[in-house]
Image (cartoon, grey):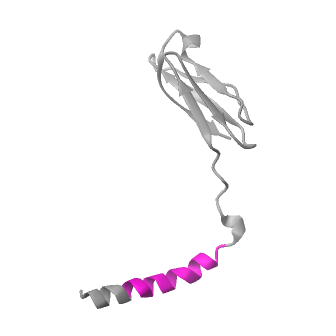
Amino acid sequence: MSIRTAAAAVVATAALAVPVLAAVPASAAPARVAACSTYSNYVSYGASCDGTRSYYAWAVCANNQVVYGPTRSGGVWSYAYCSNVGSTFRSGGYTLI
């Protein structure tokens, strides 16, 4: 394929995509993802997220049990404690509700 043919194919493809993108209503735009901060230490995992959405922290402990922090919102920290099940922290995350 020559450079001229490749360039024409790119322009033709872009011309087809523009009307499709313009047809998407504003209400279909994804919601803003909350900005979250996290913290972990030997026995716990915590999360704090901005905005109005609720969230909670969770942790997978070394003994394979999963623990959950309380549901929070507005930047208040949610902590999941592996120490509550006699274990240490292995991995964790948070869930936006």
Instruction: Check the picture and name the quadrant holding the N terminus.
Output: bottom left
Q: Residue at x 72, y 42 (%)?
A: 53
Picture coordinates of residue 92 (x, y %)? 51, 29
* Name of the residue lying farthest toward the top: 86
User: From the viewer's perspective, is 68 left or right of 72?
Assistant: left
Picture coordinates of residue 47 (x, y %)? 61, 31
Look at the picture and state if 61 lies above or below 32. Answer: above
Residues in magenta? 9-24
* Name of the residue lying farthest toward the left: 1
Picture coordinates of residue 36 (x, y %)? 61, 39
Q: Residue at x 27, y 86 (%)?
A: 3
**Quadrant position of residue 27:** bottom right
In the image, residue 49 lies in the stretch drawn in magenta? no
**Front residue of 2 and 96:** 2
**Quadrant position of residue 19:** bottom right
User: From the viewer's perspective, is 77 left or right of 52?
Assistant: left
- From the image, give the main secondary structure of the stretch colored magenta: helix
Q: Residue at x 70, y 69 (%)?
A: 26
Picture coordinates of residue 94 (x, y %)? 59, 34
Instruction: Check the picture and name the quadrant holding the C terminus.
Output: top right
Q: How many marks?
A: 0
